[in-house]
Image (cartoon, rainbow, N blue to C red):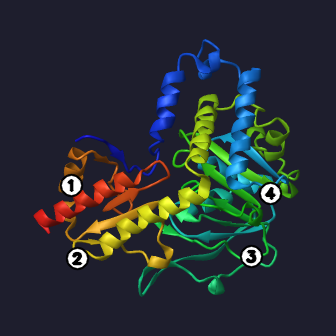
């Protein structure tokens, strides 16, 4: 075993170059003589780093000037409640596309803060596997305060690749696919993402908010979840997660050095297609998602005999292939291939899968 490849769905692997830089700077960051975790978030050196990280993210996503970029705490789950509190009144109706487990969590949280959560569409079984209902079959509300969806559901590995064409402001939970390929931010009212997949450590979140949606939070909104208040204070109304912000900034610079999101998108599509092509050509492995809705970030697959699952995982671990166990709700295997996963990791996985099939298929 010469190299480890971590296929965990999250917290997920970070770029090796980023981890090495953080290691080198851990005791003496930016010539300060102390760790980045030990200086004030108000220190000019830290504030400069934070603003540079925001600008790098804006550059990567081409974020328009009329959007705020917020660095927040609470992960993606925190945003499940922050969204309705910030952009919907208590008597509002909101539309949610229910495409999986994480959509379900978001729906249950929204129900605490608005009058009605309308399920506009959901996942269904189709002739080619699980798929998301066609937009023509969605039941949209006439005056929804917003339309919420999760473009990439990690558990089933199901994705909606087209941005919905709806009249309500679009809110997207991009925790598992942000920065994975180019994106037209101007199509959205709010984009939010927990950090622990494509950005940085867990417990950290980013929200990109159209300024038109700011200024009308519910009276009971928590101050640290108040988008307008956080925007006014540069995401430093309270002490932010300073180390996570720093690491996120390193990741943004790494992404730029890789060629930006166009290059990253090409690489991610290639990695995913390698696995799907292998699985589709095999009688031993299978994927149950309609190809048109397959995720490029999370690739679940099942073995022909689930009694072999434990052996598969044990053998994979010996080969340095970690984090392949599927979500406890669905079982099987899942290869999460976020930005930091190199093509070599996917090739190592496929080599092992082929060898396992030869021996036990």
- Which labelled disc corresponds to residue 51? none
Quarter placement of the N terminus: top left
Q: Earlier in the sequence, mark 2 or mark 1?
A: 2
Cα–Cα span, label 3 and label 1: 45 Å
Cα–Cα span, label 2 and label 1: 19 Å
- Which labelled disc corresponds to residue 310? 1
Which of the two discs, 4 and 2, sits closer to the camera? 2
Q: Earlier in the sequence, mark 2 or mark 3?
A: 3
Above or below — where is 54 with respect to 310? Answer: above
Q: Earlier in the sequence, mark 3 or mark 4?
A: 4
Q: Earlier in the sequence, mark 4 or mark 2?
A: 4
- Helix, strand or loop at mark 4: helix
The residue that mark 3 highlights is 166
Cα–Cα span, label 4 and label 2: 49 Å
Cα–Cα span, label 3 and label 4: 17 Å
- Helix, strand or loop at mark 2: loop
- Which labelled disc corresponds to residue 87? 4
Specify whether 273 is left or right of 243. Answer: left
Q: Is residue 154 visible?
A: no
Cα–Cα span, label 4 and label 1: 46 Å
163 vs 28, nearest the viewer: 28
- Helix, strand or loop at mark 1: helix
Which of the two discs, 3 and 4, sits closer to the camera? 3
Farthest left residue in view: 359
The residue that mark 2 highlights is 283
Residue 343 pos. (x, y %): 39, 55
Specify whether 209 is left or right of 154. Answer: right
Above or below — where is 275 with respect to 289? Answer: above
Q: Quadrant of residue 34?
A: top right
Which of the two discs, 4 and 1, sits closer to the camera? 1
């Amino acid at each position: 075993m010469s190299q480890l490849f971590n296929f965990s769905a999250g917290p997920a692997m970070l770029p090796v170059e980023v981890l090495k830089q953080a290691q080198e700077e851990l005791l003496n960051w930016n010539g300060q003589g102390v760790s980045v975790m030990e200086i004030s978030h108000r220190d000019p050196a830290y504030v400069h780093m934070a603003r540079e990280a925001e600008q790098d993210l804006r550059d990567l996503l081409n974020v328009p000037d009329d959007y705020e970029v917020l660095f927040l705490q609470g992960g993606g789950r925190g945003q499940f409640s922050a969204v309705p509190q910030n952009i919907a009144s208590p008597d509002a109706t909101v539309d949610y596309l229910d495409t999986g487990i994480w959509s379900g969590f978001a729906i249950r949280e929204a129900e605490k803060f608005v009058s009605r959560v309308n399920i506009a569409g959901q996942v269904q079984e189709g002739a080619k596997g699980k798929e998301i209902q066609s937009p023509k079959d969605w039941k949209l509300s006439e005056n929804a305060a917003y339309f919420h969806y999760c473009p990439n559901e990690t558990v089933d590995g199901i994705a909606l690749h087209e941005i919905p064409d709806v009249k309500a402001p679009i809110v997207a939970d991009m925790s598992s696919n942000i920065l994975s390929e180019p994106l037209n931010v101007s199509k959205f009212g709010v984009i939010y993402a927990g950090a622990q997949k494509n950005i940085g450590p867990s417990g950290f979140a980013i929200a990109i908010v159209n300024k038109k949606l700011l200024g009308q939070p519910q009276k009971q909104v928590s101050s640290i979840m108040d988008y307008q208040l956080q925007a006014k204070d540069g995401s430093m109304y309270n002490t932010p997660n300073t180390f996570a912000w720093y690491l996120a900034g390193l990741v943004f610079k790494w992404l730029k050095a890789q060629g930006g999101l166009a290059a990253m998108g090409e690489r991610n599509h290639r990695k995913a297609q390698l696995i799907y092509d292998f699985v589709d050509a095999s009688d031993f492995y299978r994927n149950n998602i309609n190809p048109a809705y397959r995720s490029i970030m999370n690739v679940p697959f099942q073995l022909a005999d689930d009694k072999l699952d434990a052996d598969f995982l044990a053998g994979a671990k010996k080969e340095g292939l970690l984090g392949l166990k599927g979500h406890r709700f669905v079982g099987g295997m899942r290869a999460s291939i976020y930005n930091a996963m190199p093509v070599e990791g996917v090739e190592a996985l496929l080599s092992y899968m082929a060898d396992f099939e030869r021996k036990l298929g």
